[in-house]
Amino acid sequence: MKTINLINLKGGVGKTTVSVHLAIALAESWDLRVLFIDNDKQANASSWLDADEERGSLTNILLDGNTAEEVIQPTKYEKLDLIAADMGLLEANVKALKDKVSRQDRIFADAIANIQSRYDVCVIDNPPDINMSVFNTMVVAKDVMIVSLPEADSLSGIYKMADQMEKMRPYNHHLRLRGVLLNQYLHSDISSVLLDKLREKGFPLFQTKIRFATKKAKTHLIEARLKQRSIFEELPSCGVARDLMKFVEELMDSYRTEGSHD
Ligand SMILES: Nc1ncnc2c1ncn2[C@@H]1O[C@H](COP(=O)(O)OP(=O)(O)OP(=O)(O)O)[C@@H](O)[C@H]1O
Ligand SMILES: [Mg+2]
């Protein structure tokens, strides 16, 4: 199972939008068996994927010792399953910080160990934060993607995330930055300068950039979220939908090129 972890300390950059569309595209268009893990107490992705609160959540894994199997739920997309989030993740993270006795960094890894063979890909959406549950996802994920806005502040955010990843490497030698994906992108001289800075520092960048939605596309993005479906279903011809699909193609092509299977 390939695990793709989407992160950024900064809020509102599009982690949830990108991760939900990545998961749906892989399940529906690539016919892969996908597990989506919502690791954000805001539970935006869970609600987008129409989670059933009665089926349990990641909180039950982190706080109550449930196995992944016990809390996985299907979605309306045949090949896409979900481990939902809820506000309980707040308590789970506080408890993990206070617990000085048991090992807190591998709860996640242990919980998903025996379901690895059931899925081809696991996509993880994270909160705009680094806490113990994010740390847990870094222990299991090989590939990390930073979703970022093309703004000056975002650069320092990307550097901070990269530093954090280095600190986590002793816990996961395979951890690597798969790439920085720019979202809400507007072509301008400033954007080019920011891109050059990232290239100079050696950051891997996705060639595809998700454009800033036009007013019409933004309305459809909001509609899609409300109707709990993807922009691919809502308005597949819009630029944002096409960029998101192009990004998934680029990602899958890069896996094909390197012949990676896990
Ligand atoms: N390409 C885009 N163009 C315009 N608006 C966008 C684009 N991508 C996402 N948005 C909007 O930006 C807002 C934040 O997106 P999203 O919730 O995906 O970000 P996030 O990083 O997951 O936020 P948080 O850190 O709070 O979890 C939403 O209103 C979403 O519709
Ligand atoms: Mg989010």
Image: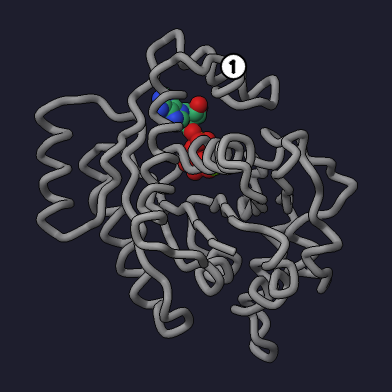
Q: Which amino acid is tagged 1?
A: Glu
Dividing the picture into quadrants, the one containing residue 69 is bottom right
Q: Look at the picture and state if 112 lies above or below 4.
A: below
Please give the name of the residue rendered at 84% of the width and 41% of the height, measured from the top-left corner: 52
For residue 91, what is the image quadrant?
bottom right
Q: Is residue 96 above or below residue 200?
A: below
On the rendered structure, is 148 left or right of 63?
A: left
The residue singled out by tag 1 in the image is: 234
Residue in the picture at 42% in, 71% down? 175
Considering depth in this image, is 85 or 28 the residue closer to the camera? 28
Residue furthest toward the top?
216
Residue shown at 77% from the left, 64% from the top? 68
Residue situated in front as seen by the camera: 12 or 212: 212
- Position in image of residue 258 (x %, y %): 35, 62
Classify 96 as above or below 239.
Answer: below
Q: Quadrant of the N terminus?
A: bottom right
* Residue plotted at (39% across, 38% down): 247
Q: Residues within 10 Å of mark 1 (few under 14, many from 20)?
A: some
- Residue extending furthest right? 54
Residue 96: percent from the left, percent from the top? 66, 75
The secondary element bearing badge 1 is classed as helix
Q: How is the image coloured?
A: one colour
Task: Judge whether 27 appears above or below 142 on screen.
Answer: above
- x, y percent for residue 245: 45, 32
